[in-house]
Image (cartoon, rainbow, N blue to C red):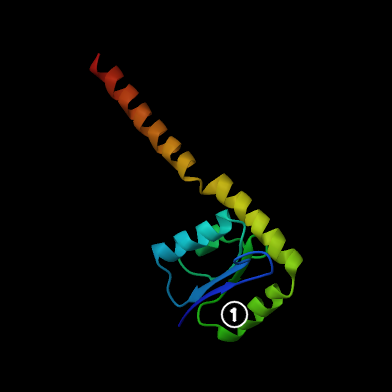
Amino acid sequence: MSVDVLAPMPGKIIDVLVKAGDKVSEDDELVILEAMAHGRAVVASKLGAVPEMVLDGVTGRLVQPNEVVALAETVIELLGDREAISRFGAAGRQRVAEHFDPQEGFRKIQAVYDEVLIENRAGRR
């Protein structure tokens, strides 16, 4: 089972990304992060790295894989609560900025390389 739903709300292209199924790919995870970075609430299955990205009840909602009834109930509940959609979207945008910023990841990797190079140069003297 795999479900991809983009739920439009007035004035926006989408407000809620639904990404659920019985497996998750790296591409799926990137789509979730991109949706969060754009302030969209997310409903997703608890698979792979998704629970590290989507905090249940904070940045979106998580459901067990293949729990179709729970997925439907969660989506219907969320679509009826515009305040939660807005709150999850804002929290998701902040979470991505604080924990999944590619520039910050690059800076951390660069710092490791710089440290190794400095240690290597110091060892040669």
Depth order, front residue of 111/40: 40
Q: Residue at x 51, y 78 (%)?
A: 65
Q: Position of residue 13 (x, y in %)?
A: 60, 66
Q: Residue at x 40, y 62 (%)?
A: 26
Q: Position of residue 37 (x, y in %)?
A: 56, 54
Q: Give the image quarter of residue 80.
A: bottom right
Residue linked to disc 1: 71
Q: Residue at x 39, y 34 (%)?
A: 110
Q: Position of residue 29 (x, y in %)?
A: 46, 62
Q: Is residue 83 above or below residue 98?
A: below
Q: Is residue 108 above or below residue 93?
A: above
Q: For the N terminus, which image quadrant?
A: bottom left
Q: Describe residue 110's horizontal placement relative to residue 31 as left or right.
A: left
Q: Position of residue 50 (x, y in %)?
A: 51, 63
Q: Confirm whether residue 49 shows in the render.
A: no
Residue neighbourhood size for the residue with mark 1, other residues' Cα within 10 Å, grouped as few (<14), some (14–19), many (≥20):
many
Count of numbered tags:
1
Depth order, front residue of 23/85: 85
SS assignment at label 1: helix
Q: Give the image quarter of residue 76.
A: bottom right
